[in-house]
Amino acid sequence: MVSRIDLHAHSTRSDGKESPTEVFEHAATAGINVLALTDHDTTNGWAEGSAAAARLGIGFVPGIEVTTRAKVLVGDRHRFISVHMLAYLPDPKYKPLADELSATLSSREVRAQGITDKLAVDFPITWELVLEMLEEGATIGRPAIADALVELGIVADRAEAFRGPLDKHGPYYLATETTDTFDAIKLIREAGGVPVIAHPLTDVRPGASRGDLPEEHFEKLIDAGLMGFEVYHREVPEVAREWLLMLARKHDLIVTGSSDYHGVHGKPNRLGENTTSPEMFERILAAGSGSKARL
């Protein structure tokens, strides 16, 4: 039997639309053999997800999608960009990482309320409505605001919200004050985890040349302990994919493929639309020591 390994999925513990149990039930239906639960900045769904996976006969990989921020030279200017770092098999009790995640969760709430306040100038949205979109204990982010805009009939779905009012280049956008990317890599490694950049270089335009890509910055991330790239993701452009594969071969890095599933009614991403090879998965298992996969 061919192994179908999907290492990036979200539940209602962050911005997914399904509980951890429902995520794994849908994974079973989709023929997934191994699934990583990687909610944003939280491990709250691990216990439920692991129990559901065991009942369904699916491998469970504990993970986190850690929100980070990097200072990158673009042209002749430095700017801050959001970098999401997948952390596989970290120790959730490692205090420095747990403290950083807690601070990020607080920052996420401040940022979400700020975006809501800016939107409220032009749309009949309230913070109370945004909070109603969340399950108790869930990580807040722009998807909850998108759900509120859908509820109000301003947009048809999350995708339209992110193309419109919540576009990161739009007037309502605010960045999250969060962990420096280099610090996040260090903390994940100290916690026994395996840091892999999620959906890198999604903003690269078609026709970009190698000179347009932040090679020096990526080399520094690798020197700092970055262990891989999520190359096979629907939002990674082909030109970026080719360059990332070249860089991965050069440094013998882990290459993953994932769906970034958010639920049937979340993003259009579908479980198993991209997968990770068994060989690369074995490398993650061998490198991670902070927590254990249940296979």
Image: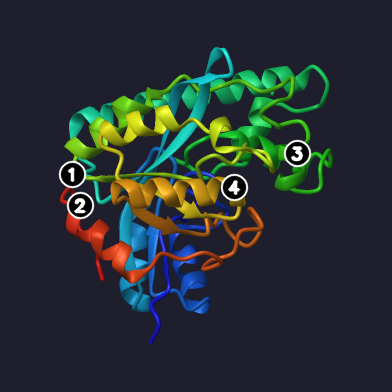
Visible in this render: residue 293?
A: no
Mark 4 or mark 2, whichever is nearer to me: 4
Which quarter of the rendered picture does the C terminus lie within?
bottom left
Q: Which amino acid does the dot numbered 1 rest on? A: Gly
Residue shown at the point (24%, 60%) measured from the top left = 283
Which quarter of the rendered picture does the N terminus lie within?
bottom left
* Among the two numbered marks 4 and 2 on one chain, the one whose residue lies closer to the N terminus: 4
Query: Is residue 107 shown left or right of residue 45?
Result: right
Visible in this render: residue 159?
A: yes
- Circle 3 crowding by C-alpha within 10 Å: few under 14, some 14–19, many from 20: few
* Among the two numbered marks 3 and 2 on one chain, the one whose residue lies closer to the N terminus: 3
| SS at circle 1 | loop
Q: CA–CA distance between discs 3 and 2?
A: 37 Å
The percent coordinates of residue 121 (x first, y second) are 79, 16
Residue linked to disc 1: 192
Q: How many marks?
A: 4
Residue shown at the point (36%, 74%) measured from the top left = 58
- Circle 2 crowding by C-alpha within 10 Å: few under 14, some 14–19, many from 20: many
- Asked if the residue under mark 1 is in contact with the one under mark 2, i.e. CB atoms within 8 Å, the reply is yes
- Asked if the residue under mark 2 is in contact with the one under mark 3, i.e. CB atoms within 8 Å, the reply is no
Q: CA–CA distance between discs 4 and 1?
A: 32 Å
| SS at circle 2 | loop
Residue linked to disc 3: 163
